[in-house]
Amino acid sequence: MKKSIIKIALCLIAVLFAVSCGNNANSSTNPTINDTPKNLNVTYTFLNNGNDRIDVNTAANDNQIKKEVDLKITVSPTVSVDAKITEVTSTGIALEPTDFQLSKTSSITTGDEIRISLLSTGIEKLKSATKKTAIDYTLTIEFTTTSEDVENKTSTRDVAISVMPLQEITKTQIENMIKGVVSFYANGLNGASFNTSGFELKALGYDISATSDSSAITYSANNAAASLSLKIDSLALYNLGLNSPDYSSTTYSGKTANLVFKFTPKLGYCFANDIETIMTSGLKINLTLSASSWKD
């Protein structure tokens, strides 16, 4: 009797052990899968030092856009999305979604960059806008995915930007500013004198020969550039929307000093397309001495 009870107990233990092993095997080879659907979430950050403004020269016939808005996109979960502008709101001049352009509208993934720009229809509407005054806009961008891993397949984001119609600075205005100097001295208050009244803005530079030049004096090319810079009326710079020029690229060779003035516009201003090089190559004036020479 006792042996029968022991046999029954052993059998029960064996059964329980087998069931336990079977459960452990199932749990290791068939782990529970979390298949809870996810919601699409798309976020963005502004690039280029947080620039959120489009600058546009509405007076130009081409190359009107001077600055655009760039976004860096993050998509969660890791799926690809399409994007489109569905609405534009503003308290200023009204623009439509079709007046803006996204540089990328499909197969967008985390890390991609999207540029927001204006199309010609939007630029045309802004021709009547006040120059140098930013207009605030809110662009509603709808991101969508077809991924089966996402339950809510749409994520909508409002992107607040501004558009600045720029005041154009023309070639004639720059020429008149330099002509307005009339004359300046290489040493500031004396020495070789140079007359700017006939100045023309040329790619290779405008040539001016000195008057009252003395062979007994050697002139500093940098001092001559500083002298001209001081003679350019600060009010003229202000009225045109220009910062004080950088003339550090000035050089000399023998009897000729090559003055190079690099101008940059203030906020709300831009150069006309045909003179934009004076920001990089610079405005050039070649000063030639007849008797003396240059130094630095």
Image (cartoon, helix red, strand yellow):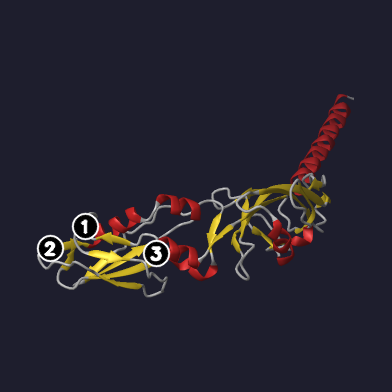
Q: Secondary structure at mark 3?
A: helix
Residue assigned mark 2: 217
In which image quadrant can residue 16 be found?
A: top right
Q: Tell me if I can see residue 42 in this picture.
A: no
Q: Residue at x 87, y 26 (%)?
A: 5
Q: Secondary structure at mark 2?
A: loop
Pick out the residue farthest to the top: 2
Quarter that holds the N terminus: top right
Tell me which label, 3 or 1, sits earlier in the chain.
3
Whether the residues at callouts 1 and 2 have beta carbons within 8 Å, the answer is yes
Amino acid under disc 3: Lys
Q: Closest to the observer: 34 or 10?
A: 34
Q: Nearer the viewer, mark 3 or mark 1?
A: 3
Residue assigned mark 3: 179
Amino acid under disc 2: Ile
Whether the residues at callouts 3 and 2 have beta carbons within 8 Å, the answer is no
Q: Nearer the viewer, mark 3 or mark 2?
A: 3
Circle 2 crowding by C-alpha within 10 Å: few under 14, some 14–19, many from 20:
few
Circle 1 crowding by C-alpha within 10 Å: few under 14, some 14–19, many from 20:
many
Residue assigned mark 1: 187
Q: Residue at x 71, y 66 (%)?
A: 120
**With respect to residue 200, does 48 lie above or below?**
above
Amino acid under disc 1: Asn
Tell me which label, 3 or 2, sits earlier in the chain.
3
Pick out the residue farthest to the bottom: 204
